[in-house]
């Protein structure tokens, strides 16, 4: 249910409406727009209360949200959600770049990559310590120690960090070390994990299930929001289709669709979305042109020897740096800004 | 790695080979066939040991398994796996019928349905106490209490029970109450759940992810097997395609494919596989003709008022009973047997 | 639009209604059922005429068909369509088996295969003279001469013949030589071809497009029916999905769905539907259990050397013969009959 | 087969090699690059001739093309193909915009839309006179007369024209009136149509089948090229997936993939690729960022009353004009140029 106020309603009056809602045991989420203010209401609602609200001064409309998801919907929260973490704003005017290896491998590896991500102009360091793998005999990640190495690298180079969490019991430990927690594509409907993430305030990057509809995706986000954590970003990472030349089919229409159905920031993952290094550059640019708020891109100093075998989709540091320089020019045409280093990273100028 | 012995090798000699393998810190899984015996070996293998084994008397071949899954493969275990639970054999000559509601709703409901499943000739009672739901505001299941009601109903009517487990921390409690644990389609790659299920001996029915390949499916089973639980059955439950008339596309070719690639029992779920009551009967028969070892079928005494809204794919008890009577005739043409009640369940003869 | 008469309406009265309809420039299609008779009406309909019909004695209802396809729908023609060709009835109680090679190669090859199809109990000889091929450098079929060889072989051995037609201009020549014309999966929406097929009376086997919905499939059939050719059979031949182990995913639910939405006979093609010889036998049986009216199965005397490279999905003659013997037992459980030879075809008993 | 010459080989020497190839009954296609020249060879090739060519002065390499398509491949023709039509270059530095209605409806409609396409900065007028429709009772297009109206409108306003051709027998009449012939998604594998288009020189825009792989797409192009018509452009128009919110899933990775595998120009169709007006603008920009050579966009003066019902995906003229103004700024960042009108088209300034 949402309450819409006219654009002349005073802040004081809005506060009164909010207090009235809360007095009835419901919670209110205020979203200020230029023309009007929307108050989203969560909780059991009776028709008498709706009628009362409708008649309050300053209230224009009381509207029921018809979608299966509520708090994730644009109706509930018309303004864009901007997630602020240590000076980085995700969902605002900044184009946010998350870069790094598929997996944390050694302290030296993650430190060197962090240096390069920062140098190129990125804001967030990605890296997996716990890896979801198709088979039980593949490398499953370094584990907790990897989290520490990544935290150290992030702090040293002035980057936020993001890492994947796979199971409810590891949420707390991952949240201790990382600034953003990632839910992988195979776990988009791991509902107990989503519920657990709703109980904390650490921002969550939720990847779309590789065969999930937009509706299912937003309902998965709703699990986290409904639990009490408003800091959710959505990530398009490619869907499974009949085409096998690419690892997945990156569904870029998802970006404007999700931005219209929801207020949450939308991130694109062109690395998993294509599975081929040579496609990461054009698909990153296309993602920005389609209106994404940020990107998560695999970059590795020695992709041919990566421990997960995902190196085939990782950019080299010089490619990553050149790409960001291109994005710096492209972003302003798409309502975003990005500030990169002015010196390119030269091929071979890094430690493997 | 597998060791193949000739058909003249004595049991004693086979025991010696097994002891030799175990002495080197590996585990051996013996699979007796009519013509030859295959010993599957798990653990780190060095080439010198392989050479030694190759030269042992009675050994015909030492072969490396080339697939990414090992213990789930037919090469590793040529004979069909038969899972025996309190007199019911899954994967053998018996056609196993699992029937019941989507969700356990009340003690009376599950008791009445158990009575009807037994009367019709089924061997296993299905019912969910914890339900994976697309959105957080849908009915999420009765919880632990439902497990108890189902256990009581199963014991009273002489049926095994199967229920879904959604998260590692609930595995133990579910295993306490149910004879078989089900992993749902959205959790097929919930690797921490699979790992946990590998640590117990309770049989697991693993549903295929609705967009998972056969290879990914067998790798998911491998997680459980590799953990030490050999009692895994595979369940085809429909895949997601462009066709929206049916809820899913039941991929019946999966049955003979999985039976050829693996030794594990294969179950078919025509209820979720079609999402339409009128298709459950023909697709059940087609599943049996395609060679499945059993079926899991939704049946409800009052499907129009089911708590999950899945009633649209549930059979009425009389339809369920008539279907099993048909299967009794069909099964022998497909190498299986089924014994049903001789009296049909009449429409309206049950308590809603 | 359909007119429904009560079960007491006399034949004479029905004739009068039909004459009345035809007098208004429309055409009437009578479908007799046990309880009631349905008269399907084709042509521009005005509401006044509908009102008149509604008031005629013997008329129970005048109903508008809401689906986009009309003549293909069950509402328009409640009784099953049975297509009769030289003593073979497709869509009736007979299970119809169409067997033969992917492509006609030589007169000797098609003659020998015809002999084996007949010996095994089949009624129709399949074989392509014009082949749709992905690339221009692949074998494109023998051409018109192949049609003659096949006609001769069919007549000699007492089999009907079916062959693919790819373009409107070849419809007449193909119809001169073959008893049934096949529209391939890539041509399901070749609307000019469908229109041309509507102008003749030769029966048409229309294959489902490999990514077409049921609705699109029935609309394609409607093109032929609306043109004036009522002799259409529908063929499920597998759809394209993410799974690449099989060539296609044979969607067996299509069989009961199409039988319920439409009155047209439904044929299954387990050869293209799986692309693997070892899956043809189980998927043929499953097709019969799902309720199909017939099968089209690739069989070849020398599949490893077939000219199209499709041999990998062709049965050997002995497998084909054994399969039909199994179907003879299975069919009666599914409301069908099949009479096969009593002697099996022995491996190696044929000319390559 | 291709012959590669060193960058120092004189033009004269290249001519001699070409003459040598032609003397042996083969045809040679010369593609000049900065560093080297590649001569693609078509025809039956014997190993002796290959050996001779390898030893000729100026020849560096003789290489067999391993792909199933030859003339469509980058190996055969390393330089981009640029198709020149009356001063417009498709595949070169110009970003080519094709705009117009789904169907030609009246002379006035197509004239007014042509005026607006030109005014906004487009180079090509699109419009269908023959429409492929799912069902036989839908509007099938105006027919030949529509071709004339469109030709007149194109000539009057200085635009090229493109129209769809559905069957071989209409190729000649369509080529008489239109500058570019379009093959629709359902006809991508209408091989007789492709063969016919290979016999003329009119440029062809080949749309990707909605469930066709890149490999099948390039093989379809090969049919036209192999027939003798080198003027083929490829069009990505969305593929069919499980997602039903959009009409299709526009696969933008197809753009860089096709540009790398082939030398043919690549056009994007964001209208059919999304099926929703509000997604056309972001997906057009994303297409340009991904590297396309041009766009085909539906624009209509009165989309709510379009005769095909496709208006829901058509832009209004002012939206079309604003979009092109944005592309004028975006194109230079993607290696392209576009010159548009300097005055925007104002809402309501056109005739309905």
Image: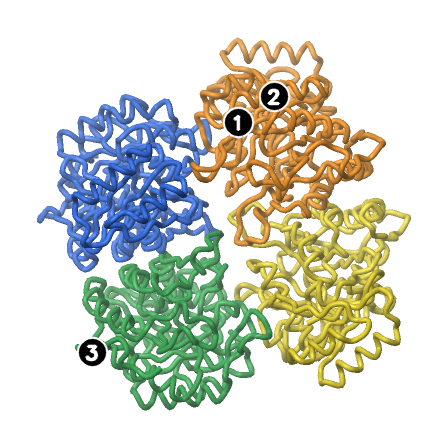
Chain colours: A yellow, B green, C blue, D orange
Quadrant where the image shows the N terminus of chain D = top right
Against C156, is A19 above or below?
below
The x and y percentages for residue D157 are 72, 21
Q: Cα distance, mark 3 to mark 2? A: 74 Å
Q: Return the mark for residue D142.
A: 1
Do tag 2 and tag 1 residues touch (Cβ < 8 Å)? Answer: yes
The x and y percentages for residue C350 are 16, 38
Q: Quadrant of residue C272?
A: top left
Spot the residue most to the left.
C342
Within 10 Å of disc 1 (Cα), the crowding (few <14, some 14-19, many 20+) is some
Which residue is disc 3 drawn over?
Answer: B341
Which residue is disc 2 drawn over?
Answer: D149
- In front: label 3 or label 2: 2
Q: Cα distance, mark 2 to mark 1? A: 10 Å
Using the image as rendered, state which of residue C289 and residue D27 is in the foreground: C289
Q: Cα distance, mark 3 to mark 1? A: 65 Å
The x and y percentages for residue A297 are 72, 55
The residue lying at 30 percent from left, 36 percent from top is C27
Query: Given the image, what chain letter belongs to the residue carrying mark 3?
Result: B
Res. D302 in view: yes
Helix, strand or loop at label 2? It is helix
């Amino acid at each position: 249910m949402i309450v819409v106020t006219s654009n002349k309603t005073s802040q004081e009056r809005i506060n009164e409406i909010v207090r009235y809602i809360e007095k009835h045991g419901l919670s209110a989420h205020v979203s200020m727009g230029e023309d009007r203010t929307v108050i989203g209401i969560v909780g059991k609602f009776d028709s008498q209360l709706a009628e009362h609200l409708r008649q309050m001064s300053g209230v224009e409309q009381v509207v029921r949200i018809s979608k299966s998801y509520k708090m994730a919907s644009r109706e509930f929260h018309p303004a864009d959600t901007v997630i602020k973490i240590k000076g980085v704003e995700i969902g605002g005017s900044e184009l946010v770049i998350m870069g790094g290896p598929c997996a944390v491998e050694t302290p030296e590896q993650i430190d060197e990559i962090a240096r390069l991500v920062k140098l190129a102009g990125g804001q967030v360091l990605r890296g997996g310590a716990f890896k979801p793998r198709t088979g039980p005999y593949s490398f499953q990640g370094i584990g907790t120690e990897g989290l520490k190495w990544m935290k150290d690298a992030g702090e040293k180079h002035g980057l936020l960090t993001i890492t994947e969490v796979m199971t409810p019991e590891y949420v707390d430990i991952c949240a201790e070390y990382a600034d953003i927690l990632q839910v992988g594509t195979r776990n988009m409907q791991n509902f107990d994990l989503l519920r657990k993430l709703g109980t904390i305030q650490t921002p969550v990057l939720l990847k779309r299930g590789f065969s999930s509809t937009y509706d299912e995706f937003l309902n998965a986000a709703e699990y986290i929001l409904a639990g009490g954590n408003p800091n959710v970003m959505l990530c398009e990472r490619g869907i499974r289709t009949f085409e096998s030349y690419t690892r997945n089919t990156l569904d870029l229409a998802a970006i404007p669709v999700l931005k219209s159905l929801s207020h949450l920031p939308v991130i694109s993952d062109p690395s998993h979305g294509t599975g081929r290094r040579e496609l990461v550059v054009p698909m990153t640019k296309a993602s920005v042109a389609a209106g994404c708020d940020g990107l998560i891109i695999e970059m590795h100093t020695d992709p041919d020897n990566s421990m997960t075998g995902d190196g085939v989709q990782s950019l080299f540091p010089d490619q990553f740096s050149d790409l960001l320089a291109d994005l710096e020019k492209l972003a302003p045409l798409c309502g975003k800004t990005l500030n990169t280093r002015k010196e390119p990273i030269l091929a071979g100028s890094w430690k493997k």
